[in-house]
Amino acid sequence: MGNQLKTAVLLGALTALIIVFGSALGGSNGMMIAFIFALGMNLFSYWFSDKIVLKMYSARQVTEAESPELFTIVHRLTSAAGLPMPKLYIIPDDSANAFATGRNPEHAAVAVTQGILQLLGPAELEGVLAHELAHVKNRDILIGTVAAVLAGVITYIAHMAQWGAMFGGFSRSDDDEGGGGIFGTLALAIIAPIAALIIQMAISRSREYLADESGARFAGTSTGLAGALEKLSSASQRIPLDANPATAHMFIVKPFTGGGIMNLFSTHPPIEERVRRLREMR
């Protein structure tokens, strides 16, 4: 399935979730309001989701004069990949991570944390940047960024509904107007964020393997990225990033720690498997 079709399916699925939520909260009137809200969010997400995510992490755009080594690596990789030069950003955080965003290769941005610049050697950093540019080349960045924004909206609305139901924000008249009442609202408030997360997972795991492979080919070797992933896996355990869960799938490695049942909902494939595949590349 092409990424344009995937984006349409994703927007449709998340829009449906918002509409179902609106129906549960306000019956037919709530459904109509939710539909209009969802359409507006889809348009807004397409044009501005990259700016929202970059601002969320206080990412600062840097110039070639400020970060000549970073620009040299990216210039080399974009030439190999046949891509336009993206805007480059640095996130002022000691955690080691990176992500790409934007609605297409002509409007792409790559953000790296201060921590990753301090942690990785040149070949490893090149591997990470090649991975992020592979997301740009494969046109993953729009679907990933839109998913982050819409999933975040659904989670926020779910939390509002949960607190509203707990403190008597919904009355029996909700049932009369077609709403789900307090118990239906509470149930949906729990289910909706999980559903949004499952949708994120569906678009995330397979694309990470493809970006690893494509990035290794842009860099001319898979060893840099394999070594970087091993370092990043350890570093993210020591210094996790204070990341919004809705954006977790955008990062090259899972930005925060989590075990037990949360591993079932991980948006990233296991680091060990990613490294194994890279080591086996010829």
Image: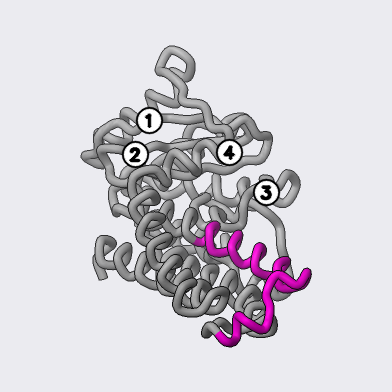
Q: Residue at x 51, y 57 (%)?
A: 249
Whether the residues at callouts 4 and 2 have beta carbons within 8 Å, the answer is no
Mark 4 vs mark 3: in front: 4
Quadrant of the image containing the C terminus: bottom left
Q: Amino acid at mark 4?
A: Tyr
Mark 2 vs 1, N-terminal side: 1
Label 3: element kind: helix
* 7 left or right of 277 in image: left
In the picture of the structure, the residue carrying the numbered disc 2 is: 108
Q: Which residues are magenta?
A: 151-176
Q: Amino acid at mark 2?
A: Ala
Q: Amino acid at mark 1?
A: Lys
The numbered disc on residue 87 is 1
* 144 left or right of 262 in image: left
Picture layout, residue 217 above or below residue 114 = below
Residue, far right = 167
Residue 126 picture location, percent across and down: 44, 37
Label 2: element kind: strand
In the picture of the structure, the residue carrying the numbered disc 4 is: 57
The quarter of the picture where residue 173 lies is: bottom right
Kindly report the distance in space between the C-alpha atoms of the residues bearing marks 2 and 3. 25 Å
In the picture of the structure, the residue carrying the numbered disc 3 is: 236
Label 1: element kind: strand
Q: Residue at x 46, y 47 (%)?
A: 223
Q: Amino acid at mark 3?
A: Ser
Whether the residues at callouts 2 and 1 have beta carbons within 8 Å, the answer is yes
